[in-house]
Image (cartoon, grey):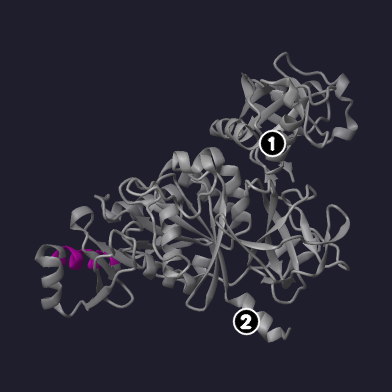
Amino acid sequence: MKVSNLTQEINRRRTFAIISHPDAGKTTLTEKFLLYGGAINLAGSVKGKATARHAVSDWMEIEKERGISVTSSVLQFEYDGYCINILDTPGHQDFSEDTYRTLMAADSAVMVIDGSKGVEAQTRKLFKVCVMRKIPIFTFINKMDRDANDTFDLLDEIEKELGIATCPKNWPIGSGKGFKGIYDRDKSCVIIYSDTEKGTREGETLEIPMEDEERLLEYIGQEALDKLKEEIELLDGASAEFDLEEVRRGDLTPVFFGSALTNFGVEIFLQHFLQMTTTPLPRKSDVGVVEPVENNFSAFVFKIQANMNKAHRDRIAFMRICSGKFEASMEVKHVQGGKIMRLSQPQQIMASERKILDEAYAGDIIGVFDPGVFSIGDTLCMPKEEFAYEGIPTFAPEHFARVRQVDTMKRKQFVKGITQIAQEGAIQIFQEYNTGMEEIIVGVVGVLQFDVLKYRLNNEYNVEIRLEPLPYEYIRWIENKDEFDLDKLTGTSDMKKVKDMKGNPLLLFVNEWSVGMTIDRNKGLILTEFGRN
């Protein structure tokens, strides 16, 4: 393949994650992008009260029942010459670890905020992750078709709560029943929307220049026009200047307004976003920075998902291609496993639909069949090369429970099911120190994950379990485990010794002060809050 063609293919890729608080309309916005990209012909409301259909990106049974996204899903579509990879993430804070891993695979993030609620708790947490990664953030203030907070207050809140400067690229004209359209600051015109059949179709837009007062009065009325003029004047004097470099450094967020449900402002946002966001970015590895175009094929695994296809009981490893071109027949090296292999059934996933791939490029997300060899954070590269991308941190679980199966005859299915779900990174499993798999302790970041575990074991493996909550809230990895004999470790009365799936020793504590006491009692002991995949 000619280098110029490779460069062209890589440069038209855009890979971003969508983050938000639950219910801010993230999955609806994702679906509308697909509508504009021609990937779907008719958009269905996520909760689907009128129809029995569900969001395209929610595929797990429990997600359909509860109307929330539990896992991150990957969607790819073409729009206006760009090849777009969207990583849709769970908004619920109990699944923030999955969102964190997904952000590792994205080059930028779209933050969706509910216009009537403003910045919510979960948005703060996810935003901090973006700041840690220095990811460019683009803000879409959604649900303007409902009564929203004052627009200046919303911007002020983003700046104060999240510590990032805002630059509105457009401006809403009213909200709720009074939502007339948006004012485009670059074009100095008002954009009016015609009926989009409750958001199921694209609908027509009408642009009216600010000079054409007669038509503006006809469409939005005197009161809305006077208010708009006043707000534009304030805005031009008060808001930050648009600076693309600052956006790409993660210091400034461009802000857009609209309603994903009715498609108002969605396509405008998509067009601007694609022009502002970057081509696939270089990645850090243990041999330095790997450039997308200059280097041969390489990728890292950021997510593993079992049982996406009930009929096949399979496991899919999702990987972000970081450099070069992938071809289905090529041999690659699995660095952590030390093996040369061909990736089996490489596919692009569109929610539950799959398309077998012949090729993919840096920036793309592909799923491959995993026979149980991959772990989150693994690197793949060409057979003659040897390097590893930075590991993905493991979040410390905050809730623990002892797990027991109800029917002891189903031991095999139980161990298989719980091990597979743990390998996906949704839960962490531990064993009592010095015992086998008889006693299993599960650790999760959020309590809702216990429900998902129970549901999935029952549904996918036909195993019923009982969960007995444990009082532990703090877990520590032993950094220098080779220097300590765990049997001789002097702890506190509320400390429990456990080991993880790889046999690493860990300590559980009920109280935070016990962590300090244990360090004091064992000279030289180093405990950490993060494990590395």
Pointer 1 residue = 529
Question: At which x and y percent is residue 245?
Answer: 52, 71
Was residue 231 drawn as part of the magenta stretch in this picture?
yes
Q: Quadrant of the N terminus?
A: bottom right
Secondary element under disc 1, as helix, strand or loop, is loop
Pointer 2 residue = 8
Secondary element under disc 2, as helix, strand or loop, is helix
Q: Amino acid at mark 2?
A: Gln
Magenta stretch: helix, strand or loop mostly: helix
Mark 1 or mark 2, earlier in chain: 2
CB atoms of marks 1 and 2 within 8 Å: no
Residue 125 vertical placement versus 451 (above, below):
below
Q: Is residue 512 visible?
A: no
Question: At which x and y percent is residue 121?
Answer: 44, 41
Residue 418 vertical placement versus 84 (above, below):
above
Residue 130 lies in quadrant? bottom right
Was residue 272 drawn as part of the magenta stretch in this picture?
no
Residue 2 lies in quadrant? bottom right
Looking at the rendering, the stretch of residues picked out in magenta corresponds to 225-235
Q: Is residue 494 visible?
A: yes
Question: At which x and y percent is residue 58?
Answer: 50, 49
Of residues 50 and 162, the one nearer the viewer is: 50
Please name the residue shown 45% across and 39% down the image. Answer: 66
Give the number of marks: 2
Please name the residue shown 50% across and 45% down the image. Answer: 69
Q: Amino acid at mark 1?
A: Glu
Dot label at residue 377: none
